[in-house]
Image (cartoon, rainbow, N blue to C red):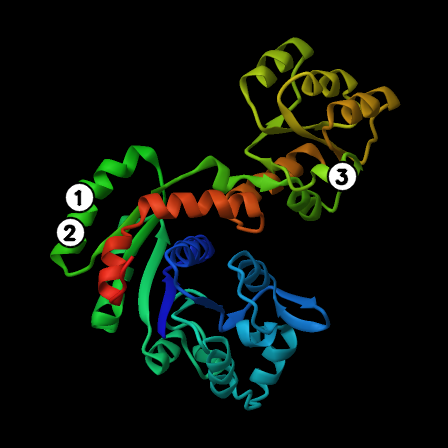
Amino acid sequence: MIPLFIASLSPLSGKNLLCAGLGLKLKKDGYNIGYFKPVGFSPVFVDDVLTDEDAVFLSRALDVNEPLQSISPVIFTEDMLQRLVKGENLNIREKTMEAFHIASSGKDIMIIRGIGRLTCGTCLGFSELDFITEVNAKIIFVDKFESYIEMLDGFLYASNVLKEKLLGVIFNLVPSAKLEYMKNTIQPFLTKHGVDTLGIIRRDPLLRATSIRDIVTALNGKILCCEEKADELIEHFVIGAMNLESAIQHFKKISDKAVITGGDRSDIHAAALETSTKCLILTGDLYPCYSILGRAHEANIPVIVVRADTATTIETCEKLADTTQLNNMSKIQHASGIIEKEVDFETIYRKLGLTK
């Protein structure tokens, strides 16, 4: 069994994206894979079991049928923090390793999703580096494109610490304008320092898209119609605060959008429903008139009412779009295609001793 650990330098860098893409590619090539997330930070109860929300979704997406307790054995909660501060021995190492041995039984490869930096988990008495050492894992680092210096510092430091355990690094969310610079300048620099670049993944609009369901949850809103469309993905958010003529011209230019406007702007509601709109988000806790609701129902376009004002609503929606949330199967399928195309599987397989 080969443990393959996915680490990062910063949060929201694409670890779930990479776990999903790697796992589906390995399954496609005939390998029996498992999935493991040592520590979860998104507590949720599933069948009366406290587990991690992301771990549940990804394990199901990868068709890993192990007990939830063995997929993500340590769930960080406020109660755990209080016990930790009081000096209680939580036996994190023992609990983690016991679960890992169960989850990895009979598997060819274990996809292990880390928290972040190698030092994460130190306060629990069992850091990511401790776990990597214990299971003799191979590591791929992924990070989103932000600061060159921080990324290079982090990757080179990881290389110095991990030595031959580090398979290489992957850059995520790279703007198209920076692709050539990454390939011609950053990648050769890392190669010169003994670090392989295993992929450069550009920003993708669909991966930044947000489901209507997530929008409703984030805004504590209410869907008035077409709730069956709640898993549809929104790529763009548009504020409908202009005059009617300008709104019509603006809405026609943007597809797969959510239009955010006051609940009292029936003219804007009607204009949005005549264009490629995925949903209407009405602010100020104001409900639309019956005719608008009827037209939305006919067009199969959900209408959402939220209490927040328009400025707060657009800010919340844009924050959602800044994170790559793989909690939707259409995103998983799209992500797997990107990973298979952009990641150097030939080098990964060679370093792991695998054949296609």
Q: Amino acid at mark 3?
A: Glu
**Residue 291, how many percent across, how many down?**
85, 19
Q: Which residue is mark 3?
A: 227
- Location of residue 200 with respect to 133 vertically, above or below: above
Callout 1, which amino acid? Answer: Thr
**What residue lies at 54% left-to-right and 72% top-to-bottom?**
71
Residue at 69% in and 40% down: 230
Can residue 114 be seen in this snapshot?
Answer: no
Residue density around tag 3, few if under 14, some if 14–19, many if 20 or more, within 10 Å:
some
Res 66 quadrant in image: bottom right
Kind of residue sitting beneath label 2 = Phe
Residue 351: tell me if it is visible: yes
Mark 3 / mark 2, whichever is N-terminal: 2
Q: Quarter-wise, where is residue 155 in the image?
A: bottom left
- Please name whichever residue, 352 or 282, is drawn nearer the observer in this view of the structure: 352
Q: Are marks 2 and 1 in contact (CB under 8 Å)?
A: yes
Residue 89 numbered mark, or none = none
Camera-near label (3 vs 2) is: 3
Q: Are marks 3 and 2 in contact (CB under 8 Å)?
A: no
Q: Which residue is mark 2?
A: 189
Tag 1 secondary structure: helix
Are there few (<14), some (14-19), or many (20+) residues within 10 Å of tag 2?
Answer: some
Q: Residue furthest top?
A: 245
Q: Marks 1 and 3: which is nearer the front?
A: 3
Foreground residue among 56 and 91: 56
Q: Which residue is mark 1?
A: 185
